[in-house]
Image (cartoon, rainbow, N blue to C red):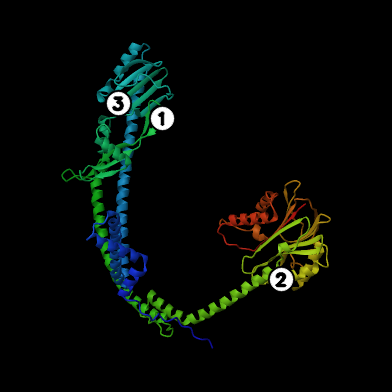
Amino acid sequence: MVRPFALLPPASTPPPGLRARVETFLLRSLAGRVLLMALAVKLLSTVLPLSAFLTAPATGVLWLFGFWGAFRLVRTPVRMLLWRIRSKLIVSYLFIAFVPVLLLTLLFALAGILGVSLLAAHLVNEDLAERGRSLLTTSEVALTDLPPGDEAAAAAFKVRLGPARKTQPALAATLLRRGRPVTSWGRAPTALPAWWKEREFAGLVREDEDRDVFRAVCVHGETTSILEVPLDQALFAPLQERSGIHVLLESESPVEARAARVGFRADISEGRGFNAAALPERLDWTTGQRQTRPLAFRFQPLDLLRHISPGIVGDEDEKRQNLSEILVLALGVVGAVFLVMYGVALLLGLLLARSITRSVHELSRGTERLRRGDFKTPIPVTSRDQLGELADSFNHMARGIEGLLLQQVEKDRLEEELRIARQIQMSLLPAEKALALPGLRIAALCLPAAEVGGDYYDLLPLSPTRLGVLIADVSGKGTSAALYMAELKGLVLSLSRIYESPGQLLSEANRILAANMDARSFITMTYAVVDVEKQTLRYARAGHNPLLHLQAETGKTRILTPPGLGLGMDKGDRFDAILEEDEVALRVGDVFLFFTDGLSEAMNPEAELFGEGRLQRILADSEALTTEEIREKILGEVRAFAGGTAQADDMTMVILKVAA
């Protein structure tokens, strides 16, 4: 009969009282002792003239503990207020309701201001580009078909620029021929800088540290025209008339202009709108370098929208309205409707939260009974909704806890048995240092993917100068593969004393295993015999991964893949017909790598295989390493390639290196 399980009852020891907690804090804790010392210093300072070196830290400590005490005093009623689920739901609902709306409002306001600022900056840049095109056109017209004589050319140049000078009185110009000034007025330069190579240019120019101008240069053969207007409000007057954007020049308001370079800001106190900055390129006339310098301007978003609005609506007898004003009014109406709907939704949410908490209260009482170990009294199901299903699930959970605890005990027992099985399986593998042949260095590794695995390697002493080396991989993983692995070890131990030929050993092992293995299982295996006296390695391969050979003489790695079929896949005839045995001469420095597909088929998070090519490259770069260093290098590369991907298959390798 199964003994019933019960949860531990709650502790019956009553919590300490307030006085005991205060005494413990003041007398037994470091923070309490510091507080007592600070109080003593402050009391002594009222009767004795103490140094500020003592009273200042004491005051700081008292203020710190005052804040901490106020926090504790506030935290207690907050905890009492939020103890009920109903209060928590209502408070959380209010946070969920109001905070996103506030954040979205701020986001949309910021996005709107930023968007309008970017639009205004674009209009400023476009206006500068239009001014540049206009100056270039004026310059090209003035240079077209000038008389050959300098005086006639100068007179014609001035006449052609007459209309432009009427519209722009501050226009300065220079006419150059073969680099010499023919005529010039204003502050326009009388020569091109040494770095000049362009045919035409129009834009902002930094003349010196305190002077920016708008300049256009046009080169027609040997004749050059330089037109220049100052960077003043007259230049931007058409822009302000079209869009209401007022460019802030450093000459008239350097503080505002520099502040606007940082970004837009609102001058709410003076009702002047927002400051922002465009980023036109400025050419340094002295060095020829192009720099991006902010150009500050001020605008009012609604005024800008009115200027760029496509038109007005309304009849002649009615009040005519701009489309932007209608849009703002429509947004206001939509916002009001949104607030009304939001208020209704908030009220309905509060009522729904109240209805939810009634069912939660019943669940709380039922779970308290479960905590005391009462699995027999069910929680009453009073509703046909998700909370009702939750109460029913609690009832099923109460009835199934005993079974789950028994299952946990059984699971722990099975895990312990698997742990012991893993220890036994790993003990079947040979110790690397237990075997040693003169002139041969050996390193091996076996890492099962599960508690027990199906990979197997062995080192079989055949004589003082001969060693049998095998590596095998049983299909599948887990307990069945581990059992076949143990069976294979005993079989190979017996056959290695009978057959000196690797091919004969594999043939006989296949004949025995094919008669006893499950039809769905098979074993791949490579078996080699190393003879250090004859300096040879004879090997045969039963469907296993290829053998990698690093040739010390050439420094190249080759793949040894004699044909062969997996053990247990055929009863004998076809297996013997396919199987081939081969021999390799040993040279000092040669390295042989036996491995299972757990290494070559390790995958990274992108499902890419590690591959035999990477193993070849690692082996080719390991000529100067020991077998242990080669093993650690291969394992490190595989793990780095796999990243955080879990090991999917057993990883086994045996490394042989011929030493002097």
Residue at screen point 60% across, 75% down: 416
Image label count: 3
Q: Which mark is residue 499?
A: none
Can residue 208 be seen in the rendering of this structure? yes
Residue type for callout 3:
Val
Side of 606 relative to 84 (left or right): right
Residues at marks 3 and 1, CA–CA distance in whole angstroms: 21 Å
3 and 1 marks in contact (CB < 8 Å): no
**Circle 3 or circle 1, nearest the eye:** 1
- SS for callout 1: loop
Residue at screen point 62% across, 65% down: 449
Task: Tell me the residue that label 1 is attached to.
Answer: 289
2 and 1 marks in contact (CB < 8 Å): no
Q: Which one is nearer the viewer's eye here, 557 or 186?
A: 557
Task: Give the quarter of the figure containing the N terminus.
Answer: bottom right
Q: Which mark is residue 486?
A: 2
Q: Quadrant of residue 471?
A: bottom right
Q: Position of residue 272 (x, y in %)?
A: 22, 42
Q: Quadrant of residue 424?
A: bottom right
Alpha-carbon neighbours of circle 3 within 10 Å: few (<14), some, or many (≥20)? many
